[in-house]
Amino acid sequence: MTKHAKLERVRARPHPELWADDELLTLREAAALYWPDGPLTETSLRTAVRDGRLPISQIAGKFFVTKTALRNLTVCEPLRDDPSAPGLTRRGPDSGYLSDLAKIREMRARSARSTPAAGCKS
């Protein structure tokens, strides 16, 4: 079966309202149905599954999703304050590229102190 043949169901019913809320769709079908021109793809949805943000049904090694699960995935929510929680975290004052640059400078300084100068023999 070709990649395009797998999307026959979506071509037959190209609008999400033509699908039942609990009807199973493959991740490829879901991406084609809801985001035919991007920004989400089958790979994006697989990542959401891996990160625990998209509940699926796995049957015969295939991932299936429902409209309800997709609707919940796309709900905007505040970033999490707990860095151990799955998903994005809020950046604190010790994050960002300026902080990263400072840490790199620190590492270089430590490395320079612990490494003998070039050309010197021990």
Image (cartoon, rainbow, N blue to C red):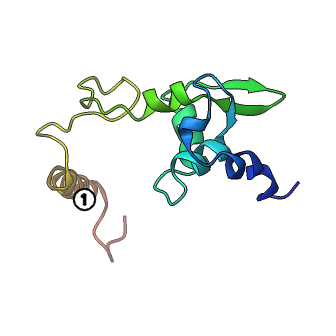
Amino acid, disc 1: Arg
Q: Is the C terminus in the top left, top right, bottom left or bottom right quadrant?
A: bottom left
Please identify the quarter of the rendering in which residue 112 is found: bottom left
Q: For the image shown, how many numbered marks are present on the structure?
A: 1
Please identify the quarter of the rendering in which residue 117 is found: bottom left
In-image side of 57 versus 77 (left or right) = right
Instruction: Kindly identify the residue that appears in the image at 61 percent across and 49 percent down.
Output: 14
Q: Return the x and y of residue 33 as percentages of the image width and height.
A: 58, 47
Residue linked to disc 1 = 108
Identify which residue, 49 or 86, lies in the foreground: 49
Is 14 placed above or below 2 here?
above
Is 84 placed above or below 16 here?
above
In-image side of 53 versus 66 (left or right) = left
Q: Is the N terminus in the top left, top right, bottom left or bottom right quadrant?
A: bottom right
Q: Return the x and y of residue 61 as percentages of the image width and height.
A: 80, 31
Identify which residue, 98 or 16, lies in the foreground: 16
Is 105 placed above or below 46 here?
below
Give the residue at the far right of this rendering.
Answer: 1
Q: Return the x and y of residue 55 as percentages of the image width and height.
A: 57, 24
Instruction: Kindly identify the residue that appears in the image at 78 percent across and 50 percent down.
Output: 6
Query: Please, what secondary structure does the residue beneath circle 1 have?
Result: helix
Instruction: Kindly identify the residue that appears in the image at 24 percent across and 59 percent down.
Output: 108
Give the residue at the far bottom of this rendering.
Answer: 119
Dot 1: few (<14), some (14–19), or many (≥20) neighbours within 10 Å?
few
Q: Return the x and y of residue 109 as percentages of the image width and height.
A: 20, 57
Is 98 placed above or below 45 here?
below
Give the residue at the far left of this rendering.
Answer: 93
